[in-house]
Amino acid sequence: MGNPIVIVGSGIVGLYTGFVLAQQDRAKDITFVAEFMPGDQSHMYTSPWYGGNFSIVSGDSDAELEYDRVSFLNLKKIHDQFGPEAGIAMLPSIEYYECDIPSPKKITSLQSYIPDFKILEKKDLIENAIYGIKFTTFNFYCPKFIAFLKQYLTARGATFIRRRLNNIDEAFEFGNKSGVTPIVFNCTGIGAYNLGGVADKNVYPTRGQVVVIRAPHIRENRGLVSPHFETYVIPRPHSTGGHVVLGGYMQSGNWDGTATYGSETASILERTRRLYPEIDDYGRKPIEIVREAAGLRPSRTGGTRIEREDLGQGRVIIHNYGAGGTGYQSGYGMAVKAISLMEQNKPKL
Ligand SMILES: Cc1cc2nc3c(=O)[nH]c(=O)nc-3n(C[C@H](O)[C@H](O)[C@H](O)COP(=O)(O)OP(=O)(O)OC[C@H]3O[C@@H](n4cnc5c(N)ncnc54)[C@H](O)[C@@H]3O)c2cc1C
């Protein structure tokens, strides 16, 4: 028998970690311990709030390219098997750039696995854009996707316990029914900033505000990277009411996750109307706002932390956090890497 496993956190990163373990038939070994779970809403719980999609915004280090690639290929399997039930769909996407165009290394990697990938010709660019890409990608109805993963894991024997931990030491008390010290995955997102025993002050929030509208006729993603803003239109697949997420903001170091601002909503509506005039039928129909929301991306100086820490006395933590703005699109690959660390130097019992 292997070690029991405790996953602290049930955001998308913890749930992907559980899902990959379940593919190895280890769901029964897992106890999730989390303050917030699918179905909850809190500014300290990033995963339920957004569009979201797989876009080109992620970094271009070898590790980041690999997390994206592994995630994309495995998301295809989840999509093909579960599609609507999981709240995932594949939709067309166009991204325009006024600056910060993706590196050739990144483009080469993406071209090798993303379907319908095409660099736009100059004549097909919008005003002020210097570069553009078209491709087919994954869209997530995020609250539905994480609820699906929780239900999938529960059905296969995983346990979910609601608890706020003050110190990582407390995690070792769970999953210990057989007297075996569990391996602990730290998937606490923004919570990693002050989790006792392993608090990581390199973690910081990147605040975003979004506007969710009802626009069932919008079936395509559109994004624009410009010097001061990232602007995007992301349909939420399989949402009742045809919801579309409009954004956004990237406010580094801003912990204000509870308030939304009218001025930011106005800016988002103005920018997304310009980018995708069909959202309000070229100004002919009033936009129907469903909600405005703010959230904190769990960013980290030095990037994502996927690292094994041996604490002595057979106690092992595997850190897996700091997904920033790409937890849905790169989290599966992060989970595969984190789990590969589990098998190294198994603790002596
Ligand atoms: C506006 C916005 C738009 C985004 N768009 C996209 C997108 O299009 N595509 C994409 O891939 N990503 C997107 N993201 C990023 C994505 O949402 C995050 O990367 C992801 O949700 C992070 O997941 P996580 O599991 O690391 O953290 P979380 O979802 O925050 O989960 C953390 C978990 O740890 C638990 N926890 C923390 N501390 C403790 C503790 N002390 N004790 C017990 N439990 C604890 C929490 O309760 C929770 O269960 C967006 C984010 C924002 C804000």
Image (cartoon, rainbow, N blue to C red):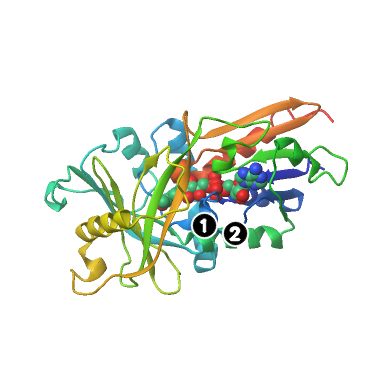
Q: Quadrant of the N terminus?
A: top right
Residue at 88 percent across and 41 percent down: it is 179
Residues marked 1 and 2 touching at CB (< 8 Å): yes
Crowd around label 2: few <14 · some 14–19 · many ≥20 (10 Å): many
Residue 265: where, in percent of width, then height?
Answer: 32, 58
Residue placed under numbered mark 1 in the picture: 48
Residue placed under numbered mark 2 in the picture: 38
> What kind of residue is marked 2?
Pro
Q: Is residue 186 above or below residue 236?
A: above
Residue 174: where, in percent of width, then height?
Answer: 78, 45
Distance from disc 1 to disc 2, alpha carbons, whole Å, reads 7 Å
Q: Nearer the viewer, residue 167 or 67?
A: 167
> What kind of residue is marked 1?
Pro
Residue at 68 percent across and 47 percent down: it is 164
**The CB of the residue at mark 1 lies under 8 Å from ligand 1:** yes
Regarding residue 14, the answer to whether it shows in the image is no
User: Splitting the image into 4 quarters, where does residue 99 fall?
Assistant: top left
Q: Nearer the viewer, residue 57 or 81?
A: 57
Residue 144: where, in percent of width, then height?
Answer: 53, 64
* Residue, far left: 123
Q: Secondary structure at mark 1?
A: helix
Regarding residue 241, the answer to whether it shows in the image is yes
Q: Nearer the viewer, residue 314 or 156?
A: 314
Q: Nearer the viewer, residue 303 or 270?
A: 270
Crowd around label 1: few <14 · some 14–19 · many ≥20 (10 Å): many
Residue 104: where, in percent of width, then height?
Answer: 29, 34
Would you say 103 lies left or right of 197 here? left
Residue at 45 percent across and 74 percent down: it is 240
Would you say 277 lies left or right of 60 here? left
Sooner in the amino-acid sequence: mark 1 or mark 2: 2
